[in-house]
Amino acid sequence: MPKVLILSREANEYEWLIRSAKLPTLEFTADLAQSDIVLGEPKLIQEALPRLTSLKWVQSVYAGVEPLVDPSQRRDYVLTNARGVFGELMSEYVFGYLLFHEKKILARIQAQQSMKWQRSESGVLRGKTMGLLGVGSIGAHLAKTAKYFGMTVRGYTRKSESSTQIDKYFHGNDLFHFAEGLDYLISVLPRTEDTNKIVDTKLLGALPPHAVFVNVGRGNAVDEPALVKALNEGKLAAAILDVFEKEPLPEDHPFWTTPNLYMTFHTSAISYPEDLTKLFIENYKLYTAGKPLNYVVDFERGY
Amino acid sequence: MPKVLILSREANEYEWLIRSAKLPTLEFTADLAQSDIVLGEPKLIQEALPRLTSLKWVQSVYAGVEPLVDPSQRRDYVLTNARGVFGELMSEYVFGYLLFHEKKILARIQAQQSMKWQRSESGVLRGKTMGLLGVGSIGAHLAKTAKYFGMTVRGYTRKSESSTQIDKYFHGNDLFHFAEGLDYLISVLPRTEDTNKIVDTKLLGALPPHAVFVNVGRGNAVDEPALVKALNEGKLAAAILDVFEKEPLPEDHPFWTTPNLYMTFHTSAISYPEDLTKLFIENYKLYTAGKPLNYVVDFERGY
């Protein structure tokens, strides 16, 4: 009988949801040595790894699995991460901020506070161009929402060209052609060696000064001092950052007070147990049938 | 030869756009007595009406045509208004504010200003319920966008049930069933006798206290003191108002300082000459072919 161990701050909710699905063969266990399946948060699982002596499969409830793909850790099991569940939430977050910017919501609040009937024209998304750094399942959903709003979408990927919602793909050295004339640059890149500081002075300089940068991927993608400089010098209209090189952000970090920089403290898309349970159950059925699992992480690649 | 007079603050742009379409028979005129067609803004057209002695057709560049349907004015011509062009813009506006509310954008800005790493959970649109007061072409577009974001949509109309995006229609005395449990109440109602103060103490009281009210229709739909009271007493989470009983809003109006009330000074959807020219040209072709025009206003009904 497969035995699952849940290592999550929301373990009770996960157990209740999985039990409600009445899977005939699955047992729950609290015994690390007994469990062949572990469902939970990467950091908690990393701590338990040495004692998970029967481990065959880990289902992460997060997309980011850095603690588990770290080269110091064992890799003798199948690691699957959370994919396909964050697209809707990320679309709500990203387009919330894009519209916040276009509709000048903050300026209207300030006009109201000064009791000014301020009729300055709003911007529109329709007709604008968005560039996605990384087009996995989240990027593909953002592209779909951008198309819904009548936008043009460019995608910069390592080599994949799988989303039909992308108007034009770019790879490798084409990064600066990709950036040229973008109204919005959105990073959904995972943390890997290849994504370190991809958003640097040169890339930021290739964007028009009215462009807005949004980072919902990982903080390592950004050269943080370069971003501060670009915003201070007005070379970028705004930046919306959900992720940072170091989280929580250190108290003396310049981001706290950089103009036109909006921070959201890694809250853009949280893992809903309902969504993750559905994903776990699908994978569990494949697991018991001896079939390949969905969303298998490549330890070398890191995602 | 049909002769068109343009009465708009953007007359030059309209003329240039229409000339670019190279309509074989159309002439432009500045002579009020000569023009059978007038394109423009209702208020400017109303002032010219007594001297428009050859008038056959007026194309308004706005949706709201109050100055022209006023009972004191002549009605011996065909009046068409702007429809089908504001849906996208209204969706951007309304969903911008809905997401601004759900994603707690203002609270995150305040947390950043206090240098607090504030991880409180955001709300989501997915699964929420929106109620539309009025389902014309703008309401139908809002419903479509709500469905895109995974919401449930109710529509309250006089009697029409033409949008397939509405999950459930309500009419007449069913207003309070319609309001029950709504997360969002959106008014897109035109100004008519029947829509006066439809959003009153009773309707606001039927909404749950976490509900948000948005008015992108006309100001007459709202009992303004009742709305101030509901917000002051915390019976409503927020109100976003683009339109008002009196515009510009008087300096001593309580709305300026009512908590959780956001004003946008009638800027939610402006008339883009590109959109309106397209609509005018379609109608012009029907006009010269002697066919019924699109978007004819019923003077009695007022829209």
Image (spheres, coloured by chain):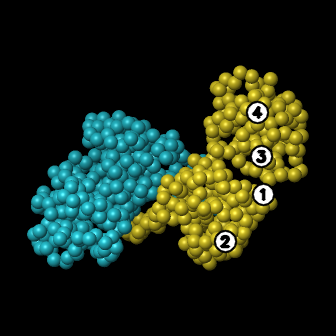
Chain colours: A cyan, B yellow
Secondary structure beneath dot 2 equals helix
Between disc 4 and disc 1, whose residue precedes? 1
Cα distance, mark 2 to mark 3? 29 Å
Give neighbour class at mark 4: few <14, some 14-19, many 20+ (Cα, 10 Å).
Answer: few
Cα distance, mark 4 to mark 3? 16 Å
Q: Is residue A269 visible?
A: yes
Q: Which residue is mark 4?
A: B291
- Residue shown at 14% from the left, 66% from the top: A55
Residue type at mark 2 is: Phe
Say yes or no: labels 4 and 1 on the same chain.
yes
Depth order, front residue of B140/B251: B140
Q: Position of residue B105 (x, y in %)?
A: 47, 62
Between disc 4 and disc 3, whose residue precedes? 4
Question: Splitting the image into 4 quarters, where does residue A4 fall?
Answer: bottom left
Q: Please, which chain is the residue tagged with disc 4 on? A: B
Between disc 3 and disc 1, whose residue precedes? 1
Cα distance, mark 1 to mark 2? 21 Å
Q: Which residue is mark 3?
A: B297
Q: Which residue is mark 1?
A: B192
Cα distance, mark 4 to mark 2? 42 Å
Q: Which residue is mark 2?
A: B176
Give neighbour class at mark 2: few <14, some 14-19, many 20+ (Cα, 10 Å).
Answer: some
Between disc 4 and disc 2, whose residue precedes? 2
